[in-house]
C-alpha cells in the first residue's frame, strides 16, 4: 500500500473557517471559541489529549481513534505552530503543546524563516522552507512507510489541495459560524470533480465530511 | 486503559440473524447469501481480505480499518470455526481461511470437545471448554495489554452479553431478511438498559449500530 497524505479530524465552522481572526498566544484560534469547534472530539474516549477515563465510544470515537493510526509524520503550517509572524526573534516559543506534544512523530513546519529543529519528548519539529511537493517527499521518507498527516491550518491544506497532493480528508464541520478568519473553502462542492464525498451527520451535532480521490 | 472485549464488524440481517440455517463446508452461512451481508465491507479499501488496490475510503472504511486495531486475541464459537458438530472425528478441518487466516493473533475457539492447538502462519487456534468469563481471562492474558475481539457467531455473542462481559459492539445491519438461522436478538432495544447506542446509516445501505457500556 502506498503512503497517503491525509487530513484527519480537521475542525471547520459551517461557513468554512478553520480558525478565527486575531491569533495570539492566548487565543490560538483568534476570535473563534475553540469549544464550539472541538467539543465533539474532546467528548470521545480516544481523544489524544484525554487524561481521565470515560468518554463516548460512538461514531465520533472512530474518528479520534483513527487520528493517529498508521501516521508516521505530520506536516503543518507556521500558524498552527506559532502565533508569531515573520523571522523568529528567538526560539523561546516551542508550540502550544507543552513538554509532551501529542504528535510523537517528526513534524514538518512550513516557514520561510530558518530555525533549528526542536525535540520535545518523542516529537521533533523541523522548520522547512519548501514547496508542498518537496516537504511531502521529506515527510514520507521520515514516516518510514506509514502515512503522513496534513495537520492544517486551513491555508496549508488549501496549498496542498491546489497542488493536488491530498489523498484523503476528514473535515468535521461544527454547527457554528465564524464570519471571518482562516478559510478552507467557499463551498466543499468545489472539490467534487476530484474527490468522492460522503457526508455523515453525527449525534454530537457535527457533520463528518469524508473525501477520497476519484 | 483497561482491555476491552469488543465486537467489531459483526454482520447481521435486518431481522436479527448472523447466519442462516443449514451450515455446511460449502455454505458457511447456511441458506444466507453472504454477499448481501458482507458486500459493504468488501468494497472498502481496508478490508482485511482485500488483495487488489482500490476500494472506498468513506464511512464504511473507518469500520474495516478499525477491525484489527489494538486487537491482541479473538474469541469465537465452534460454529464460526467449523461446520461440524460434536466430537472432532479428525483434525483435518483447519477453519475456512486457508493457510494464512486473517487473525494474526491467538484465537480461542469455544468447544466442549478437546482438540490440540493449531498454528497456521501467525494465527494459533486454541480449543477451549470454559465459561465466557474463563475464556475471556485467558484471551486477555494472551492479548498482552491489547483488546480482545469477540468474533461471533450470534450465539457466542449472546452468551457473552448474557454474562455482561461485552464492552463495545459494532453491528452492521444489512438490508436483507433471513427469516431463520442464528439469532442475535429479537430487537436491539433489549440492550438499551445497559448500553449507549448510536445508529449510523451508511451510504452503502447498511446501518452501523454502535454500543458501548453505560
Image (cartoon, coloured by chain):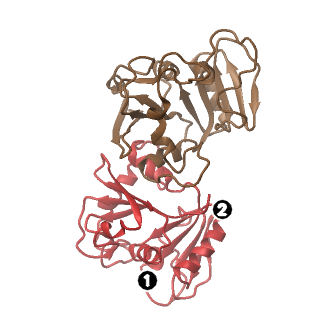
Chain colours: A red, B brown
Q: Chain of mark 1?
A: A
In the image, residue B144 sits, relative to residue A47, either above or below, namely above
Q: Residue at x 57, y 36 (%)?
A: B3
| SS for dot 2 | loop
User: Who comes first in sequence, dot 2 or dot 1?
Assistant: 1
Tags 2 and 1 both on a single chain = yes
Number of labels in the image equals: 2
Residue A44 appears in the figure: no
Q: Quadrant of residue B200?
A: top left
In the image, residue B200 sits, relative to residue A168, either above or below, namely above
Residue A193 appears in the figure: yes
Q: State the residue in front, A25 or A175.
A: A175
Q: Residue at x 33, y 38 (%)?
A: B199
Q: Give the farthest residue toward the top.
A: B86
Check the picture and name the quadrant holding the C terminus of chain A.
bottom left
In the displayed structure image, the side of residue B142 where residue B209 appears, left or right: left
Residue at mark 1:
A84
Check the picture and name the quadrant holding the N terminus of chain A.
bottom right
Q: CA distance from mark 2 to mark 1?
A: 33 Å
| SS for dot 1 | loop
Q: Quadrant of residue B69?
A: top right
Residue A207: % across, % down: 31, 54
Residue at mark 2:
A145
Q: Chain of mark 2?
A: A
Q: Quadrant of residue B114?
A: top right
In the displayed structure image, the side of residue A42 where residue B75 appears, left or right: right
Amino acid at each position: 500500500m502506498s503512503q497517503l497524505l491525509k487530513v484527519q479530524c480537521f475542525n471547520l465552522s459551517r461557513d468554512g473557517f478553520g480558525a478565527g481572526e486575531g491569533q495570539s498566544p492566548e487565543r490560538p484560534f483568534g476570535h473563534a471559541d475553540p469549544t464550539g469547534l472541538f467539543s465533539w472530539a474532546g467528548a470521545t474516549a480516544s481523544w489524544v489529549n484525554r487524561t481521565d477515563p470515560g468518554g463516548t465510544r460512538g461514531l465520533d470515537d472512530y474518528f479520534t481513534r483513527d487520528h493517529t493510526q498508521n501516521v508516521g509524520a505530520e506536516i503543518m503550517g507556521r500558524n498552527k505552530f506559532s502565533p508569531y509572524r515573520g523571522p523568529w526573534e528567538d526560539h523561546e516559543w516551542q508550540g502550544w503543546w507543552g513538554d509532551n506534544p501529542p504528535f510523537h512523530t517528526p513534524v514538518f513546519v512550513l516557514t520561510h524563516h530558518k530555525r533549528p529543529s526542536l525535540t520535545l519528548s518523542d516529537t521533533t519539529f523541523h522548520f522547512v522552507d519548501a514547496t508542498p511537493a518537496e516537504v511531502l517527499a521529506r515527510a514520507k521518507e521520515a514516516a518510514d512507510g506509514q502515512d503522513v498527516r496534513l495537520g492544517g491550518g486551513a491555508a496549508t491544506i488549501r496549498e496542498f489541495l491546489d497542488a493536488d497532493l491530498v489523498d484523503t480528508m476528514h473535515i468535521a464541520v461544527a454547527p457554528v459560524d465564524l464570519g471571518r478568519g482562516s478559510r478552507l473553502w467557499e463551498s466543499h462542492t468545489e472539490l467534487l470533480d476530484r474527490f468522492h464525498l460522503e457526508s455523515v451527520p453525527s449525534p454530537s451535532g457535527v457533520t463528518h465530511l469524508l473525501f477520497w480521490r476519484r
